[in-house]
Amino acid sequence: MALLVWSITNTVFRLSPLWGPVVNNSTHTSYTSHYNFLVNYYLEEAVLIQLQRKREMEELKRRNAQLEEQLRDFKEREAVLRTELERTRMRLHFVEEAEERLCCQMGELEAEAVAQARMYHLHVKELSDQLTAALGLLRSANSVVS
């Protein structure tokens, strides 16, 4: 505060057009009165500026605290999302492995089904050949009996 008063006093001396050599006591009183007025004016202005700066600093501190809280919240959310993402990646990996196993099993089943179809087709052909031979015997037996 002492520095502020010294600064204001110097400002008043520099800015005041009334400063000059003291001529008489009444002039000196007038100068002193004018000086006191200016000092009081600048002191009031300085106090108002300090109060305004203090309010601005408090507002900046409050806003900074809000931003820091938001940052903490975002970081927590980011950590949760990263964990969730990692879990999802693991699940995806397991699903892809399961899909690969199922595709292999399906290929094996298709190959087995084709083999069974061939065997069934051969069996049907064999039975058809036997039936044709049996019908040929029956016809020949019917022709001998008739």
Image (cartoon, helix red, strand yellow):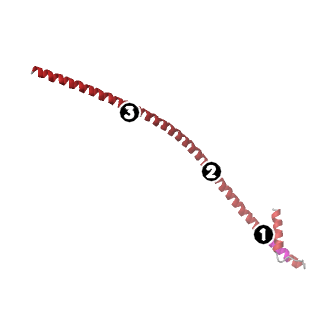
The disc at residue 110 is 3
Q: Residue furthest left?
A: 146
**Is residue 134 shown above or below 94?**
above
Q: Where does residue 139 sit, x and y in percent of width and height?
A: 15, 24
37 within the magenta span: yes
128 within the magenta span: no
**Residue count near mark 3 (Cα–Cα under 10 Å), binned few <14, some 14–19, many ≥20:** few
Majority secondary structure of magenta residues: helix
| 105 relative position to 7: left or right | left
Measured in 3D between alpha carbons, the distance from the residue under mark 3 to the one under mark 1, in whole angstroms, is 98 Å
In the rendered structure, which segment of residues is drawn in magenta? 30-44
The quadrant where residue 111 appears: top left
| 22 relative position to 143: left or right | right
**Residue count near mark 1 (Cα–Cα under 10 Å), binned few <14, some 14–19, many ≥20:** some
**Is residue 33 shown above or below 95?**
below
Q: Where does residue 62 sit, x and y in percent of width and height?
A: 66, 55
**Residue kind at label 2, given as amino acid type:** Leu
Can you identify the residue that label 1 sits on? 42
Q: Secondary structure at mark 3?
A: helix
